[in-house]
Every structure is written in structure tokens, then in C-alpha cells.
Image: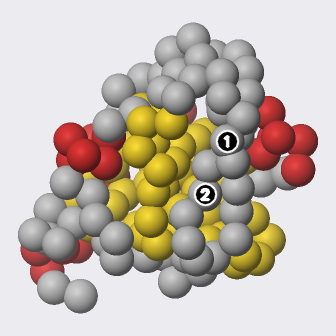
Amino acid sequence: MNKWYLLLVLVCATVFTFGFTACGKRPPAACIEKKDGSVVCVSVETARTQSQRQLGLMYRRQLGRDSGMLFIFDREQKQAFTMKNTYIPLDMIFIGRDRRIVGWVENATPLTEGPYEVDGASQYVLEVNGLFCKEQGIAVGNKVLFDALH
């Protein structure tokens, strides 16, 4: 790992933790290292249990610009999602066990059944606002780091 990459991750983590140091908690974050070496981070809610994963971002009317939901599965396998009862257009980023991006669904249409999926297996799925991947220059193979997952 090069020193600039570590510095960028530290800066990213500092930005997300600055407001939380007084209470001693850091919000969970997912940071994506792009091919040019830059890093983009989003604060995340985690969905670890079956019921949390089934609910996901359903019924919400907005999602913060640099926010998302990280779905964590017990094992790597082909994942499929729906937009049923989801009002926000989403990008769904599918991440393998090795924490590299396998693929993504761009700007999934709200209130549709899907299934939304990519070719290949994933152990994590990061949902963010629609067009995030395009705007941020995210690519298949980018490495994803998780910070402060509780």
C-alpha cells in the first residue's frame, strides 16, 4: 500500500469522524479507491440481518448526498434486489468477498420489482443515490474499504 493511499483514507475517515469525536463514536463508512488513486467515501447504515436487508431503504423519501446503506451477507453469492416500496433512485454497487467492485446497477427506477443484479457473486451491496457511480467515476475492480462498522 502506498503512503498517499493511506493518507487519503485517513483524511476521509477524519472528515466522517470529526463531528463524532466528542461522543467517542465514528459513523460507519465505505470508501472506494478509484483507479486514479483518489478515494470517495460515504457514510453508511448497515443491514446485517435478514429483516434489515429485506427492509433496506424502503419507504424513505430522501438519502443524504454522501450517504448509503451497506448490505452485509454471510457469504459470497449472486445477489438480487428489488425497488419495491423504494422511492429514491439508487445505484446498487455489488462488492465481492475480496472487497472489489464486481459491478453495479445504475439509477434503478423507484417502485419497480426488478430483479436488479449483476453477473457474478458478491458478499456486500452498497446502495447510494442514483448516478453516484457515474458522477464519481466508479469502476469495476475498484477496492472498497469499510471503516467503523459496528
Q: Residue at x 79, y 33 (%)?
A: 55
Can you name the residue that lies furthest to the top here?
61
**Horizontal relation, residue 53 to residue 111: left or right:** right
Tell me, yes or no, whether the two marked residues, 1 and 2, touch with CB atoms within 8 Å. Answer: yes
**Residue 8 appears in the picture as rendered:** no
Q: Position of residue 130 (x, y in %)?
A: 40, 33
**Horizontal relation, residue 86 to residue 106: left or right:** right
- Figure check: 116 above or below 99: above
Q: Which residue is mark 1?
A: 114
**Residue 62 appears in the picture as rendered:** yes
Q: Which residue is mark 2?
A: 117
Q: Residue at x 88, y 50 (%)?
A: 50
Return the residue nearer the eye: 136 or 107. 107
**Horizontal relation, residue 141 to residue 59: left or right:** left
What's under tag 1, amino acid-wise? Gly
Q: Position of residue 120 (x, y in %)?
A: 58, 77
* Crowd around label 1: few <14 · some 14–19 · many ≥20 (10 Å): some
Can you name the residue that lies furthest to the right here?
51
Q: Residue at x 23, y 88 (%)?
A: 1
